[in-house]
Image: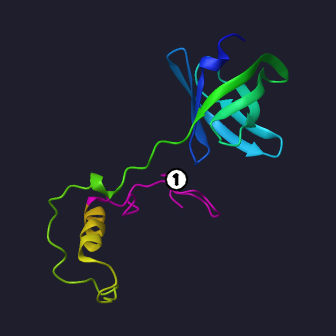
Amino acid sequence: RKGLEDEILSLREDGSGSLTRGGAVLTGRWQEDKSGLRFSVQQGPSAGEYYMGRLDKERTTLSKGVVGRGLKIVGKFSGMAALPPPPVPGLTAVPKVMPPPLASLPSSVQYVPEFISAEDEAVLLEHVRLAPAERWTGGSGRRNLNYGGKPSERQMV
């Protein structure tokens, strides 16, 4: 296939990645083993395609590889840019204005003075305050999996 040198492969540490080809971004999964790196496209018109090759020592280029679909090789390439994952945003994204710390500690928490700095404590408490509410706090009307026993008419075990 022509123009593979213009394609850019972005790999993330969690095994996901994206391939930028002609303005379109294709998402997929990647894995690396002793034979090289394999990126499988999972969405879009190219779903099912895979790119196999070796990363160079600087891990910036996927060199000398093939493009396949199933057991069929549909193209070859000599070099493709592989971008490192984008930097993770730091704690600077947390707003500077935060509510005061909790007035009293819950009974399940043990207080250890000077364990963390006041700034870190404020950031952690802000994360706890912004956390989403628990799902399934009650079982009312919830359908459960049947691990044995006879379900009722409403499928409740």
Which quadrant: the N terminus?
Answer: top right
* Range shown magenta: 130-157
Left or right, 30 with reference to 33: left
Left or right, 141 with reference to 125: right
At label 1, the amino acid type is Gln
Query: Which secondary structure, mark 1?
Result: loop
In this rendering, is residue 147 above or below 15? below
> Quadrant of residue 106 in the image?
bottom left
Residue on which the image places disc 1: 155
Q: Position of residue 16 (x, y in %)?
A: 59, 40
> Quadrant of residue 98 in the image?
bottom left
Residue farthest toward the top in the current orientation of the protein: 2
Q: Position of residue 135 (x, y in %)?
A: 38, 58
Residue 86 is one of the magenta-drawn residues: no
2 and 110: which one is in front? 2
Point 76% across, 36% down: residue: 54
Which quadrant: the C terminus?
Answer: bottom right
Point 65% across, 42% down: residue: 58
Point 52% across, 53% down: residue: 155
Q: Position of residue 80 (x, y in %)?
A: 66, 26
Q: Position of residue 60 (x, y in %)?
A: 62, 36
Report crowding for label 1: few under 14, some 14 to 19, many 20 or more residues within 10 A (C-alpha): few
136 and 139: which one is in front? 136
In this rendering, is residue 14 above or below 110? above
